[in-house]
Amino acid sequence: MSRRPIWKEPAAPGYQTVKAVVLGGFALAIIVPIMVVVSTSLASDQDIIEAGGYVLWPKHPTLKAYDTLFSGGLMGRAIMVSVFVTVVGTAIALATTIALAYATSRPVLFGRPVLLMVLFTLLFAPGIIPMFLMVKQLGLIDSLWSLILPGALGAFNFVVMRTFFMNVPAELLESARIDGASDFTILRRIIIPLSKAVIAVVGLFYAVGFWNAFFNALLYINDTAKWPVQVILRTYVLQGKSLSADQLGVEPLPQPQSLQMAVVVVALVPIAMVYPFLQRHFNKGVITGAIKG
Amino acid sequence: MLNRLLPHPTAPVEKASSVRERQVARNLPFRVRWRRDWQMVVLMIPGVVFLLLFFYVPILGNLVAFQDFQPYLGIMHSEWNGVQNFVNLYANPDFWDALRNTLILALAQLVLFFPVPLALALIVDSLVSNRIRRAFQTIAYLPHFLSWVLVIALFQQSLGGAGFVNNLLRQAGFDPIPFMTNPDTFPLLVVGQLVWKDAGWAMIIFLAALSSVDVALYEAAAADGAGRWRRLWHITLPSMRTVIVLLLILRIGDVLSVGFEQFILQRDSVGPGAAEVLDTFTYYAGVVGGDWSSGAAAGLAKGVISALLLWGANSIAHRLGEPGIFQKRGQS
């Protein structure tokens, strides 16, 4: 707890109330829908019928909706696809970003033009049709690589990483150089070990991005067996197509609400799991520092 | 930016230049620089290949906007037809609807969204208790990391026709409100969703700016009898001017692209009359409808308008004496 600075007026109940209402309302608006979705996915059929659709707190919690969801091939496959894209995509994106950020963080040959090449991408986007034609030209339609390769470098993440690398003291690199280290060695033995925190944050940003990507899959993947979780979520929750027994395998099906909510929760859980790790770094200025620089 | 590239001022300067950490030294011959830097150039290759494949070559692919593009002929063999596609767009009422919707939604987002994170940041910054502040930040940042599909699914389950808010209304004997399907209120819905998802996250930069304001200024002003509103007006807001202008410019440049997934996901439920924007027009005309050239022409028009908006906003900021985003060399 910090103390109230002496120059501030004493707390006025009117202002305090307004602040509490605004912040409290905003926080509740975020928490309540998420809670309802999670609760309903865990509720038994009886709970749902009693509550008339949605449940704020399940009286008889059950994992039946999840059992049903995972008994068929549909959801399991979608999760495999999303996990593959997220893991491989993050690894590739991190490798590309670290290499490029390090190479442009020092005044080297071609450093400036390449840097400008990256920064220009912040100002302009190639457009949907040309991207589609390119991916098609490369033969990536209906391949999971179409979800990975176009996201292999994010300009924002690049800037965050490069700013961090530029702040590694030059004396350190100089002493390594005198000891005969090459640029590869410096990157591997000095830069990367010193930048674990920023690499973790950028990696998590990439992972969240790959997990959440929806439109790429809509554009490039026609084969339903290769759909990631987000497209499943859209098809069965937003468009309201019913998850029928042939996709799920078990009968009788639980209440449709709890099934739909279980799909939502499946998309939500990985984010909820990495969020605490991400969140730890926000206030350390890793991200805001790059923006200000 | 440039001064970061220079060596630290206290670095010793008497060592041989072959071992010393690099200086700007542009006057070295190419062969010497290549021998010194080739490993760095190798490290650039994957990134540069990516940029060429998925940015610069596709940008050239916008040329199909000037062709009667046929997929089986490809870009090389399709007929050129000059500005015919743009003439067709000009005559196409759907394009004008899409342009109008884009501008309305963009303006609504700019005017109604932008002040929210600023206001939230001011309130959070004024909190004395660190614990409440941190708890609120934890909750408020979370939705930024949820996908648009998920956000809209959550909205649908909450505010949709069968969602729990309308369930409660029905149980209480009121008529349900069609929050999610009314095309007239769609701009408000869109802003509401954006506030829910991103207002907390957008706060983060304002909070960083607020924390760098010198507390002595507040103290001195308070000693001179300035109340909370005067301190806000004469100290807080002027200190944040640069950040506010910077974010506003970035927002303006981005404003035509923002919410694309949001619109495409809701186009079915509110109808194309309200939710068709330039991006969705491009997608449905080009990828879905097979009219590649019209789609590309609309996409190119959008890209050019965005770039012009960004440039315009930036030059206005320069006139007002703000650094903006394209800073002159040597500054900062």
Image (cartoon, rainbow, N blue to C red):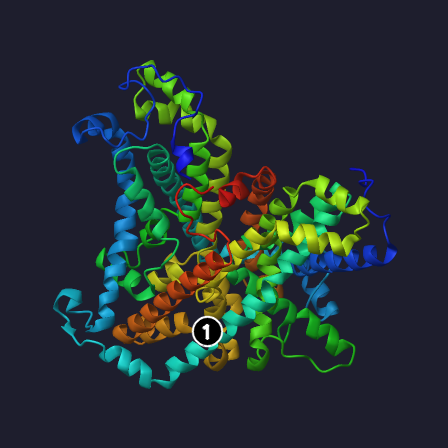
Residue A50 can be seen in this image = yes
Is residue A182 shown above or below A124? above
**Residue, far left:** B77
The residue nearer to you, when weighing A256 against B102, is: B102
* For residue B134, side relative to residue A281 (left or right): right
Crowd around label 1: few <14 · some 14–19 · many ≥20 (10 Å): many
Name the residue: 33% across, 63% down: A127
Chain designation of label 1: B
Between residue B88 and residue A263, name the one nearer to us: B88
Side of B212 relative to B309 (left or right): right
Picture coordinates of residue B163, whole percent (x, y): 65, 71
Q: Which residue is mark 1?
A: B102
- Residue B91 in the image: above or below residue A211: below
At x 46% / y 35%, what residue is drawn? A164
Q: Quadrant of the N terminus of chain A?
A: top right
Tell me the residue at 82%/54% (across/down). A16
Element assignment for label 1: helix
In this orientation, does residue A59 appear? no
